[in-house]
Image (cartoon, rainbow, N blue to C red):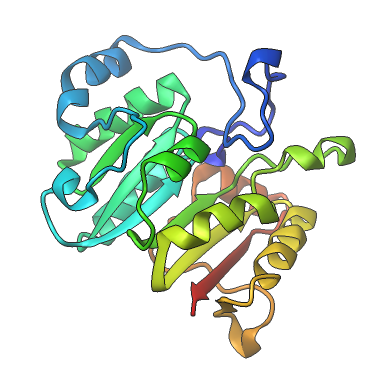
Amino acid sequence: MNENNNQHSVTEVPEEYKRSIRSFVLRQGHMTAAQQRAIDTLWPRFGVDYCDSLVDLQQCFGGGNDKVLEIGFGMGVATVEIAKRLPDKDFLAIDVHGPGVGNILKLIEEENVQNIRVMRHDAVEVVENMLADGSLDGIHIFFPDPWHKKRHNKRRLIQTAFVAKLLPKLKSGGYIHLATDWEEYAQQMLEVLSGFDNLQNTAAGGEGYVPTPDYRPETKFEARGKRLGHGVWDLVFRKR
């Protein structure tokens, strides 16, 4: 669902996986031997299995750093770079794409990053069932699938119903950072977040978009889009 793995095109969701809100679309993908090895050897250390009970994030990471949820990390390149740039924060990174899960674990080992934990599950269910209210200091959702055809817009992740599920998990003063390279989706994101009285836009004048924060690296896909004249929009709202 994320541009870090260079894929906005998607397959249809099989009927048995459809629900009112879902954070992902199922995709076919080839798992390399190195990615599979990373899952086999590193999951016990950096992986978090889904369960129907609250997870203790402090125990999960073994420390009291700020906790940031990232939904949709693609191949994990940007996520690992952000974790390196923000070593005083812990990142719970969620995606369902198998090769991406293997790749982020591989990168975690190669870069000796200790402040990421990985989940392979529907983020909506994780938010609903595993995260305590007030347990997060930040939420990152970068380049979610734009579902650019109008008849598919209802499948977009950033909608009022989903944000309403996220906000109780944020502490007061916590932030939500969204990014997209699809202008019409950026406008929808802005409208959705602006509709919550307990969210404050951090953009200049309290309106519109923010410059890309220093911690979010530019991906190859993003850089190529900019060379072609495409825009990128970042939104950062803070919970009152």
Q: Residue at x 61, y 50 (%)?
A: 162
Dividing the image into 4 quarters, which one contains the N terminus? top right
**Residue 46, quarter of the rendered image:** top left
**Residue 65, quarter of the rendered image:** bottom left
Image coordinates of residue 116 in percent, x first then y, are 25, 44
Q: Residue at x 26, y 19 (%)?
A: 39
Image coordinates of residue 4 in percent, x first then y, are 50, 39
Image coordinates of residue 213 in percent, x first then y, are 46, 69
Residue 114 visible in rendering = no
Q: Residue furthest left?
A: 62
Q: Is residue 15 above or below residue 173?
A: above
Residue 56 visible in rendering = yes
Image coordinates of residue 114 in percent, x first then y, are 16, 45
Q: Nearer the viewer, residue 85 or 229?
A: 85
Q: Nearer the viewer, residue 32 or 142?
A: 142
Q: Is residue 165 above or below residue 199?
A: above
Q: Residue at x 49, y 74 (%)?
A: 239
